[in-house]
Image (cartoon, coloured by chain):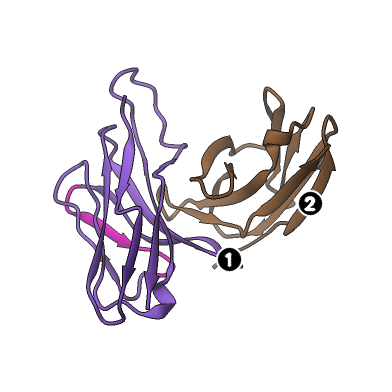
Chain colours: A purple, B brown
Amino acid sequence: DAEITQSPRHKITETGRQVTLACHQTWNHNNMFWYRQDLGHGLRLIHYSYGVQDTNKGEVSDGYSVSRSNTEDLPLTLESAASSQTSVYFCASSGFFDQSGRSSYNEQFFGPGTRLTVL
Amino acid sequence: GQNIDQPTEMTATEGAIVQINCTYQTSGFNGLFWYQQHAGEAPTFLSYNVLDGLEEKGRFSSFLSRSKGYSYLLLKELQMKDSASYLCAVRKSNSGYALNFGKGTSLLVTP
């Protein structure tokens, strides 16, 4: 079955270190998104991509970067981790399902999340 | 920018009906979405409205009034498993498929 996965599921790092969170989807979706979720703020958009080599900044992009070298993956990099980046990170994707041809651009499918702690 | 407001918490009784409201202010509206999120899990899609009116899907219905910047999610025949957070999200016409989420409403269903 097609799916969207994130790794690692839990990560503890130190301030100043570079961290990369992986997101992989097997739906062949064009659209991929990264959100962070914090108490009192809800889900906030960090970066998103509508295809290979395409990246766009979201609401809270400072301190984060993404690259899209293939359809399946959108890794999120924290250049120099800060304690304010302690959060739960969710990756999501949307696009056509090859199997059925059904258009699902209106539905984002979320990965299981990565809990990141920056000490 | 845009504001999306929804109540922080709600409590309802098993078997009852509950309505979760969402108001928004945005330029270039292009759709309103509802997601469900159980504690410790990922959000899952519930509904999508882009035109005024009611969309019904089983026990869940979603309503939209674009002129009022207002939507609600209606949950009927509440079950204990409906205890979760319900997230309202808006899509803008100039942001492609990206969503802006409200802070969510935590619903507790009691016996």
In this view, the residue farthest toward the top is: A100
Judge by depth and name the residue closer to the eye, A54 or A115.
A115
Pointer 2 local density, CA inside 10 Å: few below 14, some 14–19, many at least 20? some
Q: In which quarter of the image is residue A102?
A: top left
Kindly identify which residue carries mark 1. Answer: A39
Kindly identify which residue carries mark 2. Answer: B10
Q: Magenta stretch containing residue A54, yes or no?
A: yes
Pinpoint residue B106: horizontal percent, then vertical percent.
Answer: 69, 52
Q: What residue type is labelled 2?
A: Met
> Horizontally, is B34 left or right of A90 in the view?
right
Q: Which residue is drawn at 62% across and 50% down?
A: B88
Element type at mark 2: strand
Regarding residue B70, the answer to whether it shows in the image is no
> Horizontally, is B6 left or right of A17 in the view?
right
For residue B12, above or below residue B75: below
> Horizontally, is B19 left or right of A45 in the view?
right
Q: Distance between the residues labelled 1 and 2?
A: 17 Å
Kindly check if marks 1 and 2 are in contact, taking CB atoms under 8 A apart as contact.
Answer: no
Q: Magenta stretch containing residue B51, yes or no?
A: no
For residue A38, above or below residue A23: below
For residue B16, above or below residue B107: above
Discs 1 and 2 share one subunit: no
Q: Which residue is drawn at 57% across and 66% down?
A: A41
Magenta region:
A52-60
Judge by depth and name the residue closer to the eye, B80 or A34.
B80
Q: Residue at x 69, y 37 (%)?
A: B82
Q: Residue at x 38, y 65 (%)?
A: A116
Pinpoint residue B10: horizontal percent, then vertical percent.
Answer: 79, 51
Pinpoint residue B58: horizontal percent, then vertical percent.
Answer: 68, 22
Q: Which amino acid does label 1 sit on?
A: Leu
